[in-house]
Image: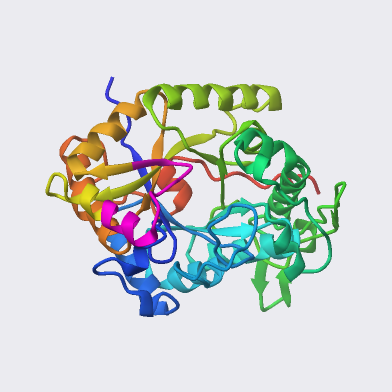
Amino acid sequence: MTPPPLHLAVALDGAGWHPAAWRAEGARPGELFTAAYWADLAAEAERGLLDFVTVEDALGLQTTAFHRPDEDTGRVRGSLDAALIASFLAPLTTRLGLVPTVNVTHTEPFHTAVNIATLDHASEGRAGVRPQIASRAADAAHVGRRTTPQLTEEDVRDPELIAWRMRPLFDEAVDVVEAARRLWDSWEDDAEIRDAATGRFVDRDRIHHVDFTGEHFSVRGPSITPRSPQGQPLVTSLAHASVPYAFAARSSDLVLITPHSWEGTAAVLGQVDEAVAAAGRDLGAWPLLRFAEVLVFLDGEPGAAAARKARLDELDGAELASDAEVFTGTPTELADLLLEWREAGLDGYRLRPGTLPHDLEQITRGLVPELQRRGAFRTAYEATTLRGHLGLARPASRYAGTR
């Protein structure tokens, strides 16, 4: 039996995922905060027929430490709002999925739901969201409404320990996603009548209060935004440990994992399966797609990517460290790895370009044609929505038929 084609996404972050990427040949550090830069990246991703791009975001300035700010000025500092970047890219693209990262610890669930539903309308059904908790205590100071735990040096050495320290924030994030999904459903598909003759713009009986009450907040609803083209935009989450796996099992349509081998992939997917079983989730009714993360440096000439990464490491003064597998090689070699790991049970990959735009172009112009030659990737977009690209059905509103 021929396996289904791979799904591919790309994670866009500033000048690239290497801290010294802004100093690389071909980088565009003077344009990182311009609309044209992001438009060019999205156009390249869509040219490569990718399923979607994600846009990174954070409440604090970039830092060398996971858990606290620092004074290092040798890497990119500053970013644009991810959801607004995605909204800007929506009318400039026609098929590419757009998935911004949104902080859900210090952002009101109602606002998150409305923002992403609006993005789905603007993109005509290509929106998603990656909910992110605020793991750094310093981020809370930007909002001033609450505090969050301060992680220690011991915490950050162990992903499981971090996750357990952050468990209350993940539990809150589950509620955020549930409230957002209810708000996305609060308008039935036929709630808008727009009958000028009778003066009825909406059918009030088809717009519903969601009445969500959780430990941390309550949301009355309904949403101010009519039901969007996908019904519910795609929810994706990044998971490194048991608590985030549980979050994905309870809340996500797609989970991003960070293995470092075929064996590691199989082991992590086993943990995800355990989390799904513990959550009582019916994968037949609500599938959970599984993507692996790989940070890539690609060049057509053997050895060139490794040499390029070594130069960047030297500029940064340290070897690149990442939660994800770091790959250096040719597009052909990367295709070999992706197809090998897929056999462990993956649906696709989110690739992190080491430098932009170079490694993005190597993905779209080198890796994609290689996968196409092997019959492992699409040769044209067949769907018009992000859910359609991923083979996910459009969910019905939970409130339909309840009136």
The residue lying toward the viewer, choosing from 185 and 234, is: 234
From the viewer's side, name the closer residue of 178 and 130: 130
**Magenta stretch holds residue 340:** no
Q: Position of residue 106 (x, y in %)?
A: 74, 61
Residue nearer the viewer, 155 or 283: 155
Q: Is residue 122 above or below residue 385?
A: below
Q: Residue at x 66, y 67 (%)?
A: 193
Q: Position of residue 309 (x, y in %)?
A: 28, 52
In the image, taking residue 271 as reference, residue 90 lies left or right, namely left
Residue 140's place in the image compared with 253, above or below, is: below
Region rendered in magenta: 309-326
Considering depth in this image, is 120 or 340 the residue closer to the camera? 340
**Residue 324 drawn in magenta:** yes
Q: Residue furthest left?
A: 301
User: Based on the displayed image, in which of its 4 quarters is residue 218 positioned?
Assistant: bottom right
Tell me which residue sits at (81%, 58%) in the image.
147
Whether residue 164 is visible: yes
Percent coordinates x, y for residue 117 in the rendering: 61, 62
67 lies above or below 269: below
In the picture, measured across the screen, residue 394 lies left or right of residue 328, that is right
Q: Quadrant of residue 241?
A: top right
Tell me which residue sits at (25%, 39%) in the image: 334
What's the colour scheme? rainbow
- Give the image location of residue 279, x and y in percent: 70, 27
Q: Quadrant for the N terminus, please.
A: top left
- Total numbered circles: 0
Residue 250, placed above or below residue 350: above
Q: In this view of the protein, can residue 249 be seen by the observer?
A: no
Q: Is residue 298 left or right of residue 354?
A: left
Q: Residue at x 67, y 41 (%)?
A: 155
